[in-house]
Every structure is written in C-alpha cells, then in structure tokens.
Image (tube, rainbow, N blue to C red):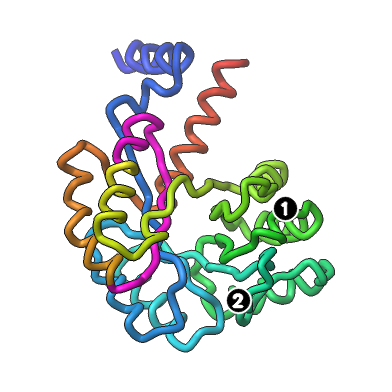
Amino acid sequence: MLKLFSKFILLLSLLSPALLFAQSAQVAIIIDDIGYRKSDAQALYLPGNISYAILPHTPYGKRLALKAQAKNNDVILHIPMESKNGKKLGPGALTSEMNENGIRESLSHAFAEIPFALGINNHMGSKLTELYQPMAWTMQFLKERDLVFIDSVTTSDSQAEDVAISFGVPSLHRHIFLDNKLDHNYIRRQFKQLIRDAKRYQTVVAIAHPHPETITSLKKLLPLLAQNNVELVPISTLLKRKLTTLNLQINAED
C-alpha cells in the first residue's frame, strides 16, 4: 500500500508539480530598514511569521535582530547598495567602486555582527543591482556560506536574482511594496493586492517598513490573510517551497 501511495504522489508530480501545493497560497512579509531607531522595536510585536531585514552596524540593529531570533522569526541583513540617485548609503554599503576584496570584507563584517542571518536583501541598490560583476562577487560570497538572496527590485533592470540563480544561491524577489505611501487607505489597498496576487501566483514576497503608520495598519490587516485562506510564512519557507518545486520539475523532465 505504501509503495502504491508513493507511486501516486510521483505521478501527480510528473503531471503538475504545482498540484502538490494546491490550495496553499503563501506570502512572506519582510520588514526592511530595521536598526536606526529605537521605535523600530514596535515591528517585532507584529503577530505571525514576519521576517526582518536588519541594517548592518546601526545603533539598534544587533539588539533587535537578537530579539527577532528569540521569537523564531527569520532574520536577514539589509545590505545598503549603491543607488542611481546618489543617496547616502550608511555603514556596510556595497558600491560599484569596490573590488571583490572590498565587497567580501564588507559582507564579512556585516555577518560577523549578526552571524545567524539567513542571507541578505538590498537596501536601495538601483545602480549596483544592474551591474553583473559586483553582483557576481556578492553571490559567490553567499554561495560559499550557504546564504540566501532576496532581490528588493529597486530597478526594473536588476540582474541580481538572475546572477544569484546562476551561482546556485537560493533566491526570491519582492513582488509588492506595502507602504510607499504612509496612508492607511493606501496600505490597505496594497495589502488587498497582496492577497489577490497570492491567490493568483501562490507565493508572494511583500516588503514594508517599520513606520508607525505601517505597524498600526498591519496589525489591523494581517488577520485578513487567514480570512482569505492565505498563509503568512517566514521567507525561509518560500525558499524551501521554491526549491521543492524546482526539484519536482527537474524530476518530471528526466
């Protein structure tokens, strides 16, 4: 009987890997920009499997990262990367002027501060993520340490996720920003779009920020996920799901 059941599951995967995840819409919400303000701690009181992106070498970054870890929330590093608008990047930034050693040294220092981070996503980066070579050096560093990459997609011409895939780095990308405008009605509309996207695509990554307006809105809006049969999961869960789907697709092609 067990062998028969196993063959049935294999047959389903060959027909359509997505069938194994039917009726399982999942979203990951990353709260970016954690570390500069003491008030950022309010984001840690959001319910559920929120993921947190911590700015390196900031006054409250390490402390809040440890608190998030203690609550079993996923933590990644929010690495500043060079943007086209020339905005100040802050400590731990990666720029196009750096060579490979400079990028590796900067990333090493960031992970020395928060060694339990699962990987990185980019803070700004509209210039750097369009450039192959610095992205290749970054992904090589991540690959060597079994770390992950989430592309915040701050430019439509980002090469970052494609480069991550080429290096075998587990990766995802941001689908929607929830709080580009600090207005509850706007955040609510974005959140409803998140739910629609989750039902359509099954897996979606959203990014928000630790603004008081955002935190207040999310506390009211997060229950809508369960009401719409959408599961809030850590970013690591979406990465595992992607890997499982890819493996099933490979098996189906063999």
Q: In the picture provided, is 83 more to the left or to the right than 75? A: right
Disc 2 target residue: 110
Q: Residues within 10 Å of mark 1 (few under 14, many from 20)?
A: some
Position of the N terminus, as image quadrant, is top left
Tell whether position 148 is magenta: no
Q: Label 2's element?
A: helix
Residue 115 sits in which quadrant?
A: bottom right
Depth order, front residue of 233/160: 160
In the displayed structure, 144 sits above or below 20; it is below
Is there CB contact under 8 Å for labels 2 and 1? Answer: no
Residue 78 bears which disc, if any?
none
| Mark 2 to mark 1 CA distance (whole Å) | 22 Å
- Tell me the residue that label 1 is attached to: 130
- Which amino acid, mark 1? Glu
Q: Residues within 10 Å of mark 2 (few under 14, many from 20)?
A: many
Indicate the amino acid at tag 2.
Ala
Quarter holding the C terminus? top right
Q: What residue do we see at 27% from left, 43% from top?
A: 192
- Which stretch appears magenta? 195-212
Viewer-closest of 196 and 138: 196
Instruction: Provide residue 72's location: percent of width, then percent of height.
Output: 33, 64
Question: Of marks 2 and 1, which one's residue comes earlier in the chain?
Answer: 2
Q: Classify residue 110 by image quadrant.
A: bottom right
Query: Helix, strand, or loop for circle 1?
Result: helix
Is 41 above or below relative to 125?
Answer: below
In this rendering, the answer to whether 7 lies above or below 227 is: above
Q: Nearer the viewer, residue 91 or 112?
A: 91
How far from the left and from the top, in percent, is residue 33?
Answer: 46, 71
| Residue 96 image position (x, y, % from top left) | 79, 66
Q: Residue at x 54, y 30 (%)?
A: 246
